[in-house]
Image (cartoon, grey):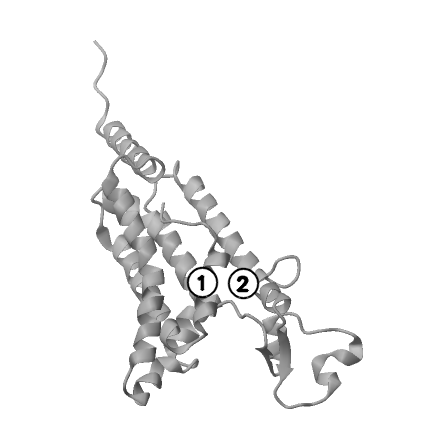
Amino acid sequence: MEPLPSRSASNGFARHKEDTELETLRIHPNSTTLSTVECIIAGIYPATLVLASTFYLLSPSPATKESYFSQKSNLFNVIFVKYGWFWTTLVFLIHLSRLRISSKPKAALRWCLATAWWILVTQWFLGPPLMDRAFLVTGGTCEMLDAAGPDAMGMSTGKLLITSAACKLQGGRWRGGHDLSGHVFLLTHASLFLWSELLPFLKAGIWGWVSSAVVAILGMWWWMLLMTGIYFHTWTEKVSYWAGLGVRKAR
């Protein structure tokens, strides 16, 4: 007669089974309900941009177009959005802590891939990031605000300001090209990544304070996306983030 498994072994088996079920839900959704939820979530973000632009255009009061959130110096933008991937990563690490060791490498790989795409689009792509390259290709240049002559443009050294960061550092701003909205890309990309991590837990009926933290940052990213849609960028610049976002869905 074989001995009964110990309580710790039984608990370990149960946790391993739960972990396996979560991964199965992530990769092989076995019901139409999850697919419907994914479609709804993916549709929230373009719908938000449509709502924001409609609100801005139809607003009867000029005062509505000037608010705290229309200022780039508002605290939500300065503290959270400008460091959006840091906060997204922080919440992801909290989420990662509740996974079993066997699932952590896969989750870390997903984060690495999402981070790499964020870097390529907004930070660096063998030089200027993809969003700056798109701006330059469409005829954009760095316009100096103080008309300080060719030296301010770096012409004396034979160099051009080919990144938005370098342009701002020299006191200039992008003019003339198609400026893909980095805020829209970041907020949507980060949100879909976090949704893809959270949905398997919600499907399994697992909540807790970690899920609450993820939902809290998702709510903030949605609100700031709405504010960006109302006050910043042209319509084409806001929707062109899809090109940078690529074909991504909440898995």
User: Is 78 displayed left or right of 168 in the figure?
Assistant: left
Identify residue for label 2: 122
Specify few, some or many for label 2: CA neighbours under 10 Å numbering under 14, 14-19, or 20 or more: many
* Residue shown at the point (36%, 67%) measured from the top left: 49
- In percent of width and height, residue 85 lies at 45, 61
Q: CA distance from mark 2 to mark 1?
A: 8 Å
Identify residue for label 1: 186
Amino acid identity at mark 1 = Leu
Occupied quadrant, residue 84: bottom left
- In percent of width and height, residue 35 lies at 29, 43
* Residue shown at the point (24%, 55%) measured from the top left: 209
* Residue shown at the point (73%, 79%) measured from the top left: 154
Amino acid identity at mark 2 = Thr
- In percent of width and height, residue 23 lies at 34, 37
In the image, residue 165 above or below residue 15:
below
Specify few, some or many for label 1: CA neighbours under 10 Å numbering under 14, 14-19, or 20 or more: many
Give the quadrant of the N terminus: top left
User: Is 209 displayed left or right of 235 in the figure?
Assistant: left
Q: Tell me whether the residue at label 2 lies in contact with that at label 1, contact meaning CB atoms closer than 8 angstroms.
A: yes
Give the quadrant of the C terminus: top left
Dot 2: element: helix
Occupied quadrant, residue 218: bottom left
Dot 1: element: helix
- Residue 90: tell me if it is visible: no
Label 2 or label 1, whichever comes before in sequence order: 2
In the image, residue 164 above or below residue 97:
below
Residue at the far top in the pictured view: 1
In the image, residue 179 above or below residue 4:
below
